[in-house]
Image: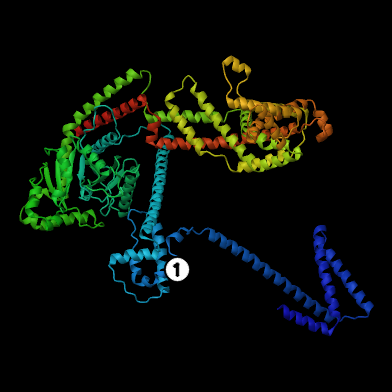
Amino acid sequence: MLRIYQNTYRRTARKAVVYSTKVACCNHSTLCNITGQAHSKRHGAGAHWQQHNNQRHEEFLLGGNQARGWTIPPHSRGYGMLVVRILRGALKLRYIVLGGAIGGGVSLSKKYEDWKDGLPDLKWLEDALPQGERWSQFSKNLIEVGGLVKNAIDIDPKLKQLGEDKLSEWRSWFDSRLDDAIEAADYQGNQIVETKEDIKAKTTVAALGISADESRKKYDKLQNQVETLQTEIMNVQIKYQKELEKMEKENRELRSQYLILKTNKKTTLKRIKKSLIDMYSEVLDELSGYDTGYTMADHLPRVVVVGDQSSGKTSVLESIAKARIFPRGSGEMMTRAPVKVTLAEGPYHVAQFRDTDREYDLTKESDLADLRREVEFRMRASVRGGKTVSNEVISMTVKGPGLQRMVLVDLPGIISTMTVDMASDTKDSIHQMTKHYMSNPNAIILCIQDGSVDAERSNVTDLVMQCDPLGRRTIFVLTKVDLAEELADPDRIRKILSGKLFPMKALGYYAVVTGRGRKDDSIESIRQYEEDFFKNSKLFHRRGVIMPHQVTSRNLSLAVSDRFWKMVRETIEQQADAFKATRFNLETEWKNNFPRLRESGRDELFDKAKGEILDEVVTLSQISAKKWDDALTAKLWEKLSNYVFENIYLPAAQSDSFNTMVDIKLRQWAEQALPAKSVEAGWEALQQEFKSLMERAKKSHDHDGLFDQLKAAVVDDAIRRHSWEDKAIDMLRVIQLNTLEDRFVHDKGEWDLAVKFLENSVTAKLQQTDETLGQMFGPGPWARFAHWQYLTPDQQKRRSVKNELDKILKTDVKHLPTLSYDELTTVRKNLQRDNVDVDTDYIRQTWFPVYRKHFLQQSLQRARDCRKAYYLYTQQGTECEVSCSDVVLFWRIQQVIKVTGNALRQQVINREARRLDKEIKAVLDEFGDDEEKKAHLLTGKRVLLAEELIKVRMIQEKLEEFINSLNQEK
């Protein structure tokens, strides 16, 4: 386009030579116009100035052309102006296009960099996958065994949620790489004559390019990482679940308060009448957390479901509850903790955990899935410390039409062999847990036996026989009889159900069918299948092996419920009397040991300690500004003094230009280490003040030492979590750099303060140096005489060296910090004449503290000389006859400490104290939800006895309430 415009311009130039002049003049006019426009914008007369400028150019052009005898036709002038405007537009268009392209390229590059930074880090795949030659080495075999390699990586079913997503992502990526390699490989038709298992193992190793051991290690490492992530996610889920429950509780309290305020009158809350089974279940819930050192034990009736692993005990419980409420696993241990299920009759089929308000609708599959996930989550959360099973009871209630009222406890299945992923004590832990529940003399034992396996392989029957040898509270249940019909001898089944095969005895024997091996079957379909089986079974129907009332889950549920309530009525009053006697004994012991104190439980004591800690935090914000300034100034100089002497003052004193070296050192210090050290000093001052408040609170007359351990733990944890804001360092750096730029002392008062600061600092350093010298040279004559002390051989040698060094300092008061070679030689020769043999390093080690003391003494003398030299300093400045650069240095440091302390004080009062308050509240909330930590921090006879008494009193009252309701029902 530009070339066309140029050719047109050339043709026009051939017609009239004046066009070139016109073009030049027009270009000149354009430049003037641009300059004029810029000038007019600055002076506010754009249009008028431009019109005047164009007129002047026309006069110039006409005048110049007429003087030369040229005449310009009007139409040629217009044609030339048109060409020039087209050229100017083309040039502008070029720059616009170029500018847009460059800008777009920069923007696109930035977007690409952002996108690239957001990609996940896949460097770990470089070690896991083959590269280059290793891949081509096995390309011939990839086509035949590709399908086997894809299935070679078996994903552990334990890896849930995030772990499954991570492995599926990795597997899909590996499959895509494998498919690309197969397409690119050169197949030569080599046949592989190996077994299927060998092909899978070898080709997996070949595809990965590593040994079998290495591949297993990498896979185990990946699995461990996923399990770690799963554990972290579980912990986070527990935390958020607790927060959600806490918010729900607060919401209910606020709602009730709102209703009371809205009605503006006292309202009496109606007491909701509870069912008998609910009241009894609450008593058992209280007993589950009851731990006592007395002889009182939990002997209240409950149905204990025991059996070998995968014997079908959980399925029996689900059949009685008429809902599939427990998670499933393929041969895997799913029941890891006792699950107490309270069955009650109600209009709707729902389930609910004891500690939540959510109700799961058991008629909806989505709610059932959520319930199973929650049960599995609670089981895994209860297992801690590398264990496989837990003693923590998971309590839930199931209500529905036609359910028999009873309380059942599902225990982990008894195992005979442990797997590698189980804890070493898993087998013994399950045995002890099962015996503990069955040893209750009033517990009903529901013994589950798998009918599809040989009866001799059962482990549960021996345990049941040990706990209930007479069989007075045992009900035997044979499961999977549909499989037993095909496998077992009818006479053998008849012996089992008549109690003649096992030496154990039972109240009754029942046969049930709990499913067809399908996970998706509903309870209704399973029950229908069970009824159809017993109607058509040759074993049970035609031969009459057992009676009809001994089959189906429905008959079993009726029998267990009837026995349960019979046991409750026989034993409940006796148990209530036992708890009443225990309560009386505990109350008597409390009155004897703590006659003036009210029995306060651990939760109440924690709330009291929490209030006292928060009161101390409020007191922290009431500390005066002067006290903060003093504390911060002292802490700042404590943190900075060593650096000032060792890295600024002493090196500058050794140089020829003291002030220049000081400026360099101070600026480097302020840019690097000073801000961070200042923040560290501020944080330590805040910590020190808060702890001092806690210590002063201990001296009050109403102090309770029971809370000391808890308070210390809360404060230490909060301080460990708390950190100063990061932006404070940048802010302090700016303030400190600006303060150090001031090199002139402004008045006599500041001068005197600086001199005093210098004297105190040098005196403190002198004391430290004297202590070092005392350890090096030993005690003086008076100390040796008064305390019968003696000099060691090394101290005597040090004293001889010191005497020679003192001679050098006396002859040269302004001696440099280092000794010359000649001086070292002279000292050694002088000592050798006195039969003292030392090397040069020994002399240098002695010289350093001796010279430091000499230097500090001179510095202290200069400070005293500068006390009255302020006016001389203001008149002569750095050329003052009395050298007071030391005073100016310490005045600058004093000003930095002053402004830094002021800034830190404002940060403490305005920000850091409030942030520390939030940290303490967060720690208190966490401790309040952690029962183990509260039990560890709030302990002692007073706490334990109060907890015992409160728990027994609550259980005894609930038992009496239950007995009254039970008698009314009769």
- SS type, badge 1: helix
Q: Which residue does the image show at 43% across and 73% down from the upper left? A: 184
| Side of 488 relative to 231 (left or right) | left
Question: Can you tell which quarter of the image residue 817 is in?
Answer: top right
| Side of 781 relative to 306 (left or right) | right
Question: Can you tell which quarter of the image residue 675 is in?
Answer: top right
**What's under tag 1, amino acid-wise?**
Glu
Does the rendering let one see residue 266? no
Q: Which residue does the image show at 33% across and 25% down from the upper left? A: 945
- Pick the residue in front: 799 or 847: 799
- Pick the residue in front: 421 or 287: 421
Quadrant where the image shows the C terminus = top left
| Side of 868 relative to 935 (left or right) | right
Residue beneath disc 1? 133
The x, y position of residue 470, in whole percent, is 11, 37
The x, y position of residue 680, in whole percent, is 58, 37
The x, y position of residue 847, in whole percent, is 67, 31
| Side of 411 relative to 881 (left or right) | left
Q: Residue furthest left?
A: 543
